[in-house]
Image (spheres, rainbow, N blue to C red):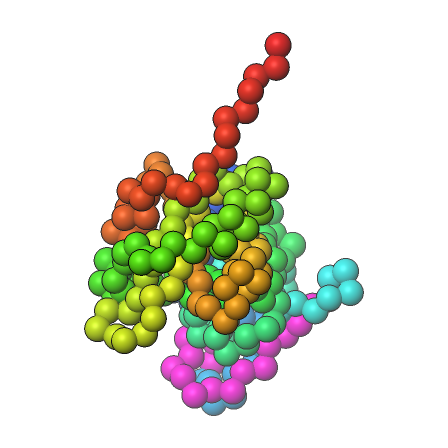
Amino acid sequence: MSFVPENKLEEAMLQAASHAPSRPLFYRLLMETELYVLGVASGSSGAGPLTGGEMINIDSITRDGKSYHPVFTSQTRMNAFVPEPQSHFLLRGRALFESTRGASFVLNPNSDLGKTLVPDEIAYWLAHSRQSADQTDIVVGQPDIYPKKLVKALCVLFMSRSRIAAAHLAYAAPAGSHEAAYPLIGLEADSDVPTLAQEIFQVAATTLPGARIDVVYLDPNAPGTPLQQHLLSIAPFYRRAPEIPHN
């Protein structure tokens, strides 16, 4: 691969391509970084960052019969895709994705390092990349009544998902709020966490209809935030059995 990173987002993207635990950092930077977007922003004075309030019209491309919006991590990646000058603007990832919910994107199309971003994946990381570093906005504890039905159903699901190493359960509630506590699943997995999260949500919708549930990615080698450290300290309700070597 001849991809040479030019900024922190591209460095994180390159690392995430081969190291699953690095993916949350990539998505966080994707939300925080100004992306190059092909299209027109009404009220914008040029190709600089938008200030808010502009109406945007984003270009689309078609791949395998599906429509995607092309966005880029740097001007170099954009220029490689459209060598001739073309109308574009800069917009922070979070603002872009929040204003286009339900749309699909392709990051750095035709580059040595590109990525398709689908709606469920974007929605997951919009929610989870916003979490504060110290998680002081929620209170975490154990439930008074353990959700046995949910746990049993999740264990059945996880047994057929070989990339899941372990799962931990806690209950969380907003600090200072009377809102009911909800299940919080800490997932140790070497796989696409947004996809796994959607499967967990589907199981929860059957076993706990109408209840809120959240999923947090855990890396035991880099515990991260206090919330992640706390979840890792809880005995897992599921742990994949070690493989038995064959003689």
Residue 16 vs residue 190, the one in the foreground:
190
Q: Which residues are magenta?
A: 46-61
Tell me the chief SS of the magenta region.
Answer: loop
Number of marks in the rendered image: 0
Query: Quarter holding the N terminus?
Result: top right
Write down the quadrant of residue 21 in the picture: top left
In the rendered image, the vertical position of residue 194 relative to residue 232, given as above or below: below
Q: Is residue 60 magenta?
A: yes
Name the residue: 60% across, 72% down: 103
Write down the quadrant of residue 214 in the picture: bottom left
x and y, in percent, of residue 48 in the image: 43, 75
Query: Quarter holding the C terminus?
Result: top right
x and y, in percent, of residue 49 in the image: 41, 75
x and y, in percent, of residue 238 in the image: 45, 41
**Left or right of 12 on screen, residue 64:** right
Residue 5 vs residue 175, the one in the foreground:
175
Name the residue: 50% across, 78% down: 99
In the rendered image, the vertical position of residue 5 relative to residue 163, given as above or below: below
